[in-house]
Amino acid sequence: MARKRWSDLSPKAKGAVVGLAAVDAGLRAWALRDLASRTKDQVNGPKMLWQSGMAVVNSAGILPLVYLVRGRRSTPDTQTA
């Protein structure tokens, strides 16, 4: 089966591709910014592995979402007296 070219896609399919790319870029930026602001003790697993994975792997937003849900350790809230 031949690969489809961009010009072969319907307008609806083009919109879906652009929308998915925008969601992926937003999640990736949010996850990388959050990761940069945390210490290694606030991250489940090695920070360098999360950073390189999100920078290299094209996961359609799945890897940044996994980091945001499972890769961060919850920070203790400040207790009020």
Image (tube, rainbow, N blue to C red):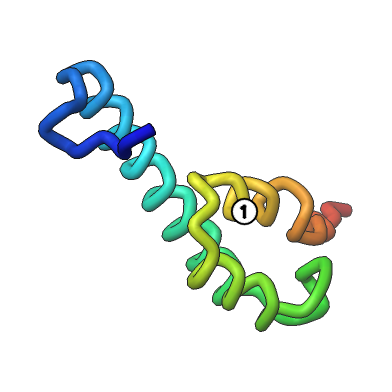
List the single residue furthest toward the front.
1
- The residue identified by callout 1 is 63
Residue type at numbered disc 1: Leu
Residue at 55% across / 76% down in the picture?
A: 36
Residue 11 can be seen in this image: yes
Query: Is 45 left, or right, of 20 in this rendering?
Result: right
Residue at 77% across / 79% down in the picture?
A: 46
Residue 79 in the image: x percent, y percent?
A: 85, 55
Residue at 34% across / 43% down in the picture?
A: 21
Query: Is 5 left, or right, of 59 in this rendering?
Result: left
- Looking at the image, residue 79 lies above or below residue 5: below
Residue 76 in the image: x percent, y percent?
A: 83, 59
Query: Of 2 and 30, which appears nearest the observer?
Result: 2
Query: Of 65 and 57, which appears nearest the observer?
Result: 57
Q: Quadrant of residue 52?
A: bottom right
Number of marks in picture = 1
Query: Is 77 left, or right, of 5 in this rendering?
Result: right
- Looking at the image, residue 5 lies above or below residue 64: above
